Amino acid sequence: MKSLLATFVAVTSVLIPSTQALYFYLDGTTPKCFYEDLPKGTLVVGTYKSEAYSPQTQTFSATPDLNIHFTVEETFDNDHRVVTQTTQSSDQFSKFTFSAADAGLHRLCFTPSGPAAISVNGWFGNGGNGLGGVKLTVDMAIGETSKIESEDKGKIDTLVGKVRELNGRLQDIRREQKFQREREAEFRDQSEAVNARIVRWTLIQLGVLGVTCAWQLSHLRSFFIKQKLT
């Protein structure tokens, strides 16, 4: 029984991908890096939020003067950089997503920059709190997790709604095309009926003309024959 329980725990730990949620403090423009040993094809999705220390309010808050430069490098491939992005500090979380192209150790670094980070580093040292001038909150999910699916559920619902709207418009277009085809068929039938009547009337006129000509010729012939006899 114990062996079955141990096997279940081991399998569960393998099937459920790891997640990390943490925050830490940075001193000015000093980068913060951590390492993840990722299998090939592993999906990594994360969010982060940066806040600068304000000596006036003695609190951390978002400011547009603070930027965070995020990079991902493959340490096993001469520090090949696979991801680089720079975001501005705001009340909203910034998102990063990447997939490990090869298995190995990856280095993820967050580097503060901008006037807020420089002023904190140069004037206030550790931000006056003994911890750091920049507070960085990171939430990361490694692997195809239900958390990633729940975060993207809103986007998926939006896409589903757009697809349904497109399907509705497609149905409207098909109905309009069917209506146009029916009108074209009706117009074609009417045109063919009119053409048939015109041809029939023409034939009737030709027939009448032919009979009239034959009657006139016969009458003239009889007239000439009578004139010779007299």
Image: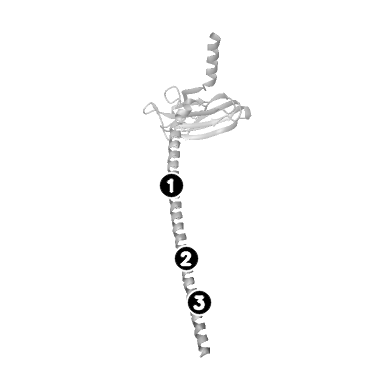
Residue extending furthest top? 1
Where residue 144 appears, as percent x and y from the top left, is: 52, 27
What residue did someone put label 1 on? Answer: 175
Residue sitting at 43 percent across and 29 percent down? 51
What residue did someone put label 2 on? Answer: 200
Amino acid found under the numbered disc labelled 2: Arg
Amino acid found under the numbered disc labelled 3: Ala
Residue extending furthest left? 57
Q: Looking at the picture, does residue 184 appear above or below residue 67?
A: below
Q: Quadrant of residue 83?
A: top right
Q: Which of pointers 1 and 2 indicates the residue nearer the eye?
A: 2
Q: Which mark identifies residue 31?
A: none
Where residue 121 appears, as percent x and y from the top left, is: 47, 29
Mark 1 or 2, nearer chain start: 1
Mark 3 or 1, nearer chain start: 1
Q: How many marks?
A: 3
Local packing at callout 1 (Cα closer than 10 Å; few below 14, some 14-19, many 20+) is few
Amino acid found under the numbered disc labelled 1: Arg
Residue sitting at 45 percent across and 49 percent down? 178
Residue extending furthest right? 77
Residue sitting at 45 percent across and 44 percent down? 170
What residue did someone put label 3 on? Answer: 214
Q: Which of pointers 2 and 3 indicates the residue nearer the eye?
A: 3
Local packing at callout 2 (Cα closer than 10 Å; few below 14, some 14-19, many 20+) is few
- Contact between marks 2 and 3 (CB within 8 A): the answer is no
Q: Which of pointers 3 and 1 indicates the residue nearer the eye?
A: 3
Where residue 211 appears, as percent x and y from the top left, is: 48, 74
Element class at badge 1: helix
State the CA–CA distance, disc 1 to disc 2. 37 Å
